């Protein structure tokens, strides 16, 4: 059973790294939406038309975008925390430290996944207030952020299952 937990831990580390990179690239680039006319692009932080970009902080788009920015910063910070927690989990030698790190990994990845999911859902549903749906389509950065958020939800689920099975195996060994 110990070998399986090591493999699960290493897979979580790899997926956590990929999720962080994916979300970080999606978070920072202005290709959440692309328009057909004038090479238009829109993202959380910049809107670009014909190669000229303007910060979304300087224009009044709406409170929904500020909420998306705040939640996406939360998701980015907790994704970086998840990387630290997964490294602690891999390096810990005491079972109690590994167990605590696994619980920390569940918390940080769940917060990351939920914050990213809420950000993406609000952006997707509210974008039509500013960007006409017939002119602007979802683009690559939005999809990268979506993949990153989904990977964190998967890590949270896998780690939760791993903790539960370890607890069940431990309690069945105590009874025999």
Image (tube, rainbow, N blue to C red):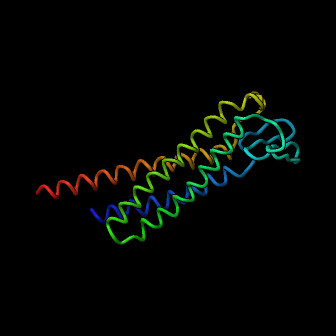
Depth check, front residue: 142 or 98: 98
Q: Is residue 117 left or right of residue 67?
A: left
* Vertical position of residue 86 compared to residue 119: above or below: below
Q: Where is residue 55 in the image (x, y as percent from the top left)?
A: 82, 47
* Vertical position of residue 33 compared to residue 19: above or below: above
Q: Position of residue 174 (x, y in %)?
A: 16, 58
Q: Give me the residue at 24% from left, 52% from top.
A: 168
Q: Give me the residue at 55% from left, 57% from top.
A: 18
Q: Residue 81: which quarter of the image?
A: bottom right
* Vertical position of residue 128 compared to residue 2: above or below: above
Q: Give me the residue at 70% from left, 35% from top.
A: 64
Q: Is residue 152 left or right of residue 176?
A: right
Q: Is residue 35 left or right of residue 73?
A: right
Q: Where is residue 149 in the image (x, y as percent from the top left)?
A: 55, 47
Q: Where is residue 121 in the image (x, y as percent from the top left)?
A: 61, 35
Q: Residue 43: which quarter of the image?
A: top right
What quarter of the picture does the C terminus occupy? bottom left
Depth check, front residue: 148 or 123: 123
Q: How many labels does the image show?
A: 0
């Amino acid at each position: 059973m110990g070998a399986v937990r090591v493999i699960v831990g290493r897979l979580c580390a790899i997926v956590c790294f990929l999720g962080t990179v994916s979300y970080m690239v999606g978070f920072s680039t202005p290709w959440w939406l692309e328009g057909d006319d004038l090479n238009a692009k829109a993202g959380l932080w910049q809107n670009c038309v014909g190669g000229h970009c303007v910060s979304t902080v300087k224009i009044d788009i709406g409170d929904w975008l500020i909420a998306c920015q705040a939640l996406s910063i939360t998701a980015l910070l907790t994704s970086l925390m998840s990387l630290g927690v997964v490294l602690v989990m891999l390096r810990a030698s005491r079972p109690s430290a590994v167990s605590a790190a696994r619980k920390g990994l569940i918390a940080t990845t769940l917060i990351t996944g939920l914050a990213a999911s809420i950000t993406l859902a609000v952006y997707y549903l509210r974008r039509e207030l500013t960007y006409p749906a017939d002119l602007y389509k979802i683009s690559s950065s939005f999809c990268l952020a979506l993949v990153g958020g989904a990977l964190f939800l998967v890590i949270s689920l896998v780690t939760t299952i791993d903790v539960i099975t370890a607890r069940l195996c431990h309690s069945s060994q105590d009874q025999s």
